[in-house]
Image (tube, helix red, strand yellow):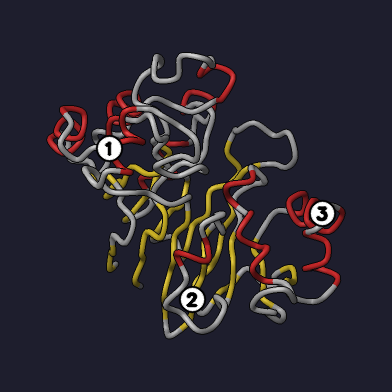
């Protein structure tokens, strides 16, 4: 199974449109890598599974000449499904692409424009089985702001775990056990510290801090990749002391195009 990080940024990517944080300017100037919105590509037995469809889907998918064979969606925060606009008749005109998602997520797509046109037109269909290729797709509920839908992590064949959004690890007692069952886990690393965003409280946004994540899962044998980096997160800069700290602790920091084989 081959996994490619298509997008390692938080929903708005890096540089974020209109933002003037130091890291945004450094990305614009080519001093640090740009990051697109959160998405993971899984390839197995000649088939493709896309975990979350970011607003940057067209850029992430531009070398490919066919839609993914299946999609898995974690939740309805817009950076995780906005790329679905490219699946309708105005774009690739995909037909019958199976979607692994919760009942609430599928209902959200079915009852809200413009997404309902994708369902009504047969471009996207609810997956009829829990199996993709010969791998089970398991949707694992996790606590995260539920304005529109519930939130899940996606387990692919019990080997890889895609978990880009969660409120706080303390609200999910099973976290270490679930992560530890997988060989490879992509985990929410949106923020490094509480003071990254001056005009908003991180308490209102709901994400664990990276140092807490690293401390909690330090004893696991799972290969952990930190992803979904906000444009303010110092991990966006590979030269930063925070990046050095994460690597020294045995963690990997996702970047667009990073490939894994498991």
Residue beneath label 3, please? 107
Q: On the rendered image, what quadrant is the C terminus found in?
A: bottom left
Secondary structure at numbered mark 3: helix
Q: In the structure shown, which secondary structural element does the residue marked by tag 1 occupy? A: helix
Which residue corresponds to mark 1? 26
Residue positioned 64% across, 42% down in the render: 77
x, y percentage for residue 154? 52, 54
State left or right for residue 240 relative to residue 233.
left
Q: Is residue 246 above or below residue 183?
A: above
Q: Mark 2 to mark 3: distance in Å?
A: 24 Å
Alpha-carbon span between mark 1 and mark 2: 33 Å
Q: Residue sitting at 54 percent across and 28 percent down?
A: 167
Residue 162: x, y in percent?
46, 52
Residue 171 horizontal side relative to residue 98, left or right = left
Label at residue 131? none
Crowd rating for badge 2 (residues with CA inside 10 Å; few <14, some 14–19, many 20+): many
| Element assignment for label 2 | strand
Q: What distance separates the C-alpha of mark 1 from that of mark 3?
A: 41 Å
Q: Nearer the viewer, residue 15 or 42?
A: 15
The residue that appears at 47% across and 56% down in the rendered structure is 39
Instruction: Measuring from the top left, give residue 234's x and y in whole percent.
Output: 28, 30
Mark number for residue 48? 2
Residue 25 in the image: above or below residue 115: above
Above or below: residue 217 compared with residue 109? above
């Amino acid at each position: 199974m081959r996994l490619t990080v298509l997008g390692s940024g938080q929903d708005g990517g890096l540089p974020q449109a209109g933002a003037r944080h130091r890291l945004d300017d450094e990305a614009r100037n080519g001093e640090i890598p740009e990051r697109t919105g959160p998405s993971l590509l899984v390839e197995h037995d000649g088939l493709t599974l896309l975990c979350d469809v970011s607003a940057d889907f067209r850029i992430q998918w531009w070398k490919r000449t066919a839609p993914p064979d299946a999609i898995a969606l974690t939740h309805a925060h817009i950076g995780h499904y906005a790329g679905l606009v490219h699946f309708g008749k105005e774009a690739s005109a995909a037909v019958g692409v199976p979607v692994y998602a919760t009942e609430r997520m599928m209902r959200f797509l079915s009852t809200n424009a413009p997404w309902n046109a994708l369902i009504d037109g047969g471009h996207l269909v609810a997956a009829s089985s829990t199996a993709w290729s010969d791998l089970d797709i398991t949707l694992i509920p996790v606590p995260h702001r539920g304005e529109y839908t519930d939130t899940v992590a996606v387990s692919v064949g019990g080997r890889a775990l895609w978990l880009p959004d969660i409120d706080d690890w303390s609200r999910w007692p099973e976290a270490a056990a679930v992560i530890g069952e997988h060989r490879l886990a992509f985990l929410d690393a949106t923020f490094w510290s509480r003071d990254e965003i001056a005009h908003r409280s991180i308490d209102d946004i709901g994400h664990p801090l990276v140092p807490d994540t690293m401390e909690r899962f330090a004893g696991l044998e799972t290969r952990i990749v930190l992803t979904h980096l906000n444009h303010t997160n110092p991990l966006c800069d590979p030269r930063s002391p925070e990046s050095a700290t994460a690597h020294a602790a045995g963690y990997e920091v996702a970047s667009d195009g990073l490939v894994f084989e498991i």
